[in-house]
Image (cartoon, rainbow, N blue to C red):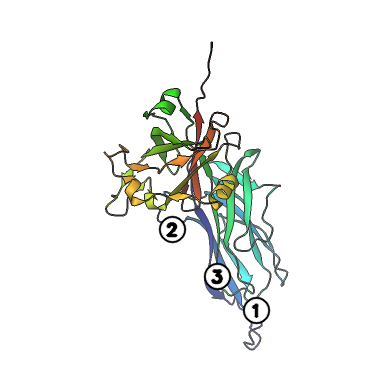
Amino acid sequence: MRNSLAFLAAIGLSACGPNFNDIADSEGNGEGSGEVVTVSVGVSESDQPFFGLAAATAFSMSLDGCASGLTYATISDTNPNIDVYKFDQGCLVKLNSFDYGGVTFVPSAGDPFTSWIAGDLATFEESGNPANTIRVAVATQLDNPVSGTEAISYTFSEIVAGADEAIAKTVVSDAHAITVAGQAAPNFTISAVSFVGMTATGGGQFQFTLDCAGAFTGTVAGLDAACDGTLLSALTYNMVEDTYASVLTAADASTIFGGGSTAVAAAQMNDPGGAAPSGGFVTLTLTGPDLMHTKPNMILILEAAGTSYQYFNIDVSTLTYTP
């Protein structure tokens, strides 16, 4: 199972103002016959306050679709300035690849960008390893027509796997603390799990204690408690039946949370030394699928501000009888 850091980073292009480049403007008639805008291309971390983030180390973009006929086949981090015509129409700056953590990600054949305008989503995959995927969104794009004041940005996030959790027979029969080794962002481990009940339709009911596996900062009372840079107040969680062969994609996780989730309330948060020894939170009671004995496999998922995920495979040890 792949464990990795979750991240949200922006690939930004900011307008630096008009550069006339000695080309005459036709009597200032507003038709954009000569005015050029110099646009800088760069990669930077997002300014979102609730993530411990990292930036892409390299990228490749291109420019096409412009009514003027202007195109750039390759825009890279090694040459971070391009010129575009002000008032040009239909121009699109397209992200073709980026590097993160020594891995090059390229658009997948099955889920590429379609419009390249703000809000468009795509799945990128590791070059040569299509099983390793990442979600990318167009946050902002060049104005149409080009205004010279816009900023262009792409954001990307990764689905993160925590350690599997097997619920033993002793846990199903009574509350029991289980320590697991897990690392991810949101960066938590399951330090305890309690089997607290069962519904009339046979759904097991559980509570989980999530302990920060990294640096815990701030305080619950101060409303700024955070684990590895992720505010506890920015977390939501969910538990579903494992119908995913124990491996979630970012698209799977996004779909799951689209059906609702539970926010981490202040009453469930703990400073270090409380129910979560390193600081963290205790979930409310979560109900698994009906007929727990025949559907013992579940997934507990943490979501940080609708962008990054950590998940744990939760497997109940079923009962057997040998005469």
Residue 34 marker: 1
Which mark is nearer the camera, 3 or 2?
A: 2
Indicate the position of residue 119 as horizontal and vertical percent values. 60, 61
Indicate the position of residue 246 as horizontal and vertical percent values. 57, 34
Labelled pair 1, 3 in contact (Cβ < 8 Å): no
- Which residue in the protein does label 2 denote? 47
Indicate the position of residue 232 as horizontal and vertical percent values. 38, 49
Q: Is residue 292 above or below residue 160?
A: above
Q: Nearer the viewer, residue 188 or 75?
A: 188
Q: Could you tell me which quadrant the C terminus lies in? A: top right
* Measured Cα–Cα span from mark 1 to mark 2: 35 Å
Asked which secondary structure carries label 1, the reply is loop
Labelled pair 1, 2 in contact (Cβ < 8 Å): no
Q: Is residue 183 above or below residue 220?
A: above
* Residue at 63% over, 79% down: 23
* Measured Cα–Cα span from mark 3 to mark 2: 18 Å
* Residue at 40% over, 56% down: 49
